[in-house]
Image: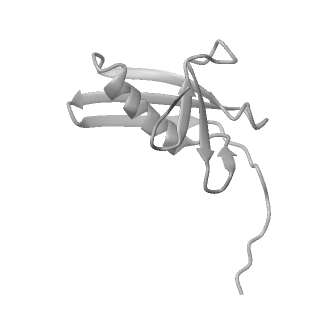
Amino acid sequence: MEIISCNIGFTFETYNEKFTIHTRNICPRNGIEDPGCGIGNAALGAYLLKNKHFNQNEIRLKAEQGKIVNMPCSIEISTNQKEENDIQVFVGGKGRVMIKGEFNIE
């Protein structure tokens, strides 16, 4: 598994064959794992387009995330590059409520 600077770990070995990549977003300062991180997967999409698929102008990935923490998520990543330093990234997926509550400030 490779680790990049935004704390996303990834591998192309997946639990489910309908996914192209398995990701994990670890928050070491807080000691928690985000089960579905759009920002981290967006950064990963740009990283992969620039460093792994550099001979392509566009890639589409379907990431599985959250399996390790029993909150599986599906995140779609689409990236394209029209000019050398102009990468567009789109992420999406389905979300669900993890916790509900109230926050009071006095």
Type of colouring: one colour
Please tell me which residue is depicted at 34% across the width and 22% down the height of the picture. 58
Quadrant of the image containing the C terminus: bottom right
Q: Quadrant of residue 88?
A: top left
Nearest to the observer: residue 28 or residue 50: 28
Nearest to the observer: residue 6 or residue 49: 6
Q: Is residue 98 left or right of residue 2?
A: right
Q: Position of residue 63 (x, y in %)?
A: 58, 26
Q: Position of residue 51 (x, y in %)?
A: 34, 25
Please tell me which residue is depicted at 77% across the width and 69% down the height of the picture. 102
Count all numbered tags in the image, as a single digit: 0
Q: Quadrant of residue 25?
A: top right
Check the image and name the residue furthest to the top. Answer: 17
Position above or below: 99 against 22 = below
Check the image and name the residue furthest to the left. Answer: 83
Quadrant of the image containing the N terminus: top right
Q: Is residue 71 left or right of residue 24?
A: right
